[in-house]
Image (cartoon, coloured by chain):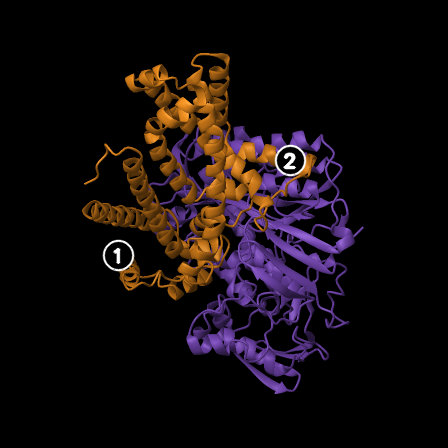
Chain colours: A purple, B orange
Amino acid sequence: MKSTWNRCRSVLATAAVAAAVALPGAAGAAKSDDTLVVALQRGITSVDYLYTTKREYIILSELTDDGLFDVDPETLRIRGLAAKSWHQVDDTTIDVQVRDGIKFHDGSPLTADDVVYTYNWVLDPKSNANRSRQFAEWLASVTKTGPMSVRFKMKYPYPLALRAMGASMPLRKKSTYDGAAASGSKPLGQTLNGIGPYKVVSVEPGRKTVIERFDGYYRDSPKGRPAIRRMVFREIPDWGTQEAELMSGGVQWMYDVPYDIASTLGSSPVASALNGPSLRVGFIVLDAAGLSGKDNPLTKLAVRRAIIHAINREAIVKSIVKGDAQVIDSACHPAQFGCTQDVMKYPYDPAKARELLKSAGYPKGFTFDLWAYREKDSAEAIAADLAKVGITARLRFVQLATLDQARKKHEIQSYFGSWGSGSVADTAAIADVHWSATTDRNMSGDKQVTEYMIGAQKTVDPAKRAELYAKGLRLIAEKAYWVPLYTFSLNYLVSKELDFTPPKDGMPRLYLAKWK
Amino acid sequence: MLKYALRRGVLALLVAFTVSVATFFLLNFATDPAQALAGEDAPPEVVEQIRAQFGLDRPLVVQYASWIGALAHGDLGQSYHWRSPVGALIASHAPVTIRLALLAMAVTIGVAIPLGAIAALRPNSIVDRLALSVAVGAQAIPNFWLGLMLIILLAVKFPIFPVSGDTTWMHFVLPALVLGASSVPAVMRLTRTGLLDVLASDYIRTARSKGFRGLRLLTRHAMRNAMLPVVSVLAVQLGAKLGGSVIVESVFALNGLGRLALQSILGGDIPTVQILVFVFALTFVILTFLADLLNAWIDPRIRLG
């Protein structure tokens, strides 16, 4: 959320930095030290990803942890990491062979016992692990079938099983949580014995976390051997200060940087502004089911279609969102599996919008509430576009919690939402949260949509899944339950000394970074 | 005096309690702590799990009663965000803020009082106008802007000081300058006004007639009386600085109480915010009390009680 004050701050900070860009900055000594300093707005308080959820933590966990599987950064397909091979025995059973020669950071070997221990610990509600309920939803049991082999039994066919067994489930040494189990408390997460390419050296919550390349990392890892020896994750909350650190050589990598800041500093001789996709999409959910009131104009199909025709999404992307963002037509990210773009399209056409409104019985337009908790600039532009065809969108800009509460009580006619899908390149990652029968986010009231979108989530065959998603997404577009807006882009500022390629799925993998 | 101190102590606790109740309910109404802890995109199951783990699914009144009950037994609680005891968390962050506040106060006193005195000695002169301009300028410049400009000039262009962090004394120079500058206008103008009043009084005329002039007149006769309101303002300023200078600590990435408060608010860490509010409120009340004592010591005509 960007308040007016924050915008003023941003403008002044950018102006200050722009002034400084004109001055020659100091060169950094990062390359000679072989130490990459990463700036984070929010710091690391725990290095155990089983007990955290936010984006910063998964960036770190990609370095210090490995799970059985991970996502190939090139193809975005699942590949074995600690899993040497796997076999789908039937729709609900997967056998996994664990790779030999993997060591924990304390030098002990990874065995099937450790894999079974990790999964059973997370499945145990007493573990207080953040994703216990998520795993317990589909995973029935994990058993050892040999010294290096494990069997996974699912409660129902779950096509996302291998993805879930990736970064979300970093492997732990057997008995790691014995202390926490005895005390009944959450582990502090100030130390870590993982199997990732980097080991944790020190954690100073709120200040910095230091990691170092793990020399015992298995040579046949698909992640490869990292080029950079040491990384420091520093918490620097202010963008201006991060920029100053980058200019003075104190920081080499900045993440999720506002576009104006990135473009200003990116033109300087000390830093490069890189732009990459993110799996986040923006959209407006319309109360087609009339949950907020039966006389709600949004229950009429022609009105919903008029709204989409009235919004100039291309112009919003070009002048507000900028970067790598693109207009979308489907209720998902085009890079996600199953996200067909072959759906009904609604080009910007104010005349058609007026025509549709007339046919729906609103020749002079109508007034409705548009709730939003972020992207205020875009929401205001949308309201302005709607006003041009006679629709008055009363913008209710609130905190996320307020919006959530109002939506639970069915007090919302429409809301501007966004979803990052946890960088999972599969439509299931956005469909489950928004189209299940029980979620208050589903304001369509259309059981058929739920059947398609959630049915795909319980179908293993990829072709059948894609078909179900296509049917669901076409229905959503045809009935205009959502106004699909655009994808977001991620801006990075990196030192000229650093070779870093923005990831295709918005998940930075710093183990691939190297010095030029 | 004891009665006075006790009365102020009870008042302090009442203020802290009221602020704490308001903070607790406002925070809960404005944010969803479970959602804040889980992150914006966390699946609903994760959010609900966190809610259950921390007892955030209980009625607010029950949550508050449970917290205040534990506090009454000396248990400051456990931070949701940092997963450590709140007491330890505050103890680890306080030294940074105390160091910054004291240095900033040194800057304020070192600049504002001499400037105010010079302005008072030469009212309406160029020196006076210049001092006023400095004061108005310092008041008009936002902290974060001044901070960034100092960083760019003295840490990037001429790398004399580190850009950010709090590991050495050098890290505190720029933040102390910024934080200290923000209090200069108020203290300087109060010093000037106070001195102008005192310098026009009969006893100063008597002192002048006895041959006291310049610095001697100022320090031995005028300053003591002119300082009474300044001491009170300095106490409030110190309280504000000890209460966590959120912006300065954020700009310079200092890991002090201000930043802890900000992180805790953003992270939905209500136990930490609650105790911080208590600490800040008590700090203010204690400093005001100490200022009263100091005023009584400076001017024996003031009697407490």
Q: Is residue A86 left or right of residue B179?
A: right
Categorize mark 1 by other alpha carbons within 10 Å: few (<14), some (14-19), many (20+): few
**Residue A246 image point, x, y percent:** 68, 43
Q: Is residue B179 left or right of residue A460?
A: left
Which label number is shown at residue B61?
1
- Which residue lies most toward the right here? A516
The answer to whether residue A483 of the structure is visible from this angle is no
Please tell me which residue lies in front, B298 or B131: B298
| Residue A48 position by quadrant | bottom right
- Subunit bearing disc 1: B
Residue tagged by mark 2? B154
Please tell me which residue lies in front, A358 or B117: B117
Mark 2 or mark 1, whichever is nearer to me: 2
The answer to whether residue A406 of the structure is visible from this angle is yes
Q: Secondary structure at mark 1?
A: helix
Q: Say above or below: B211 vs B148.
A: above
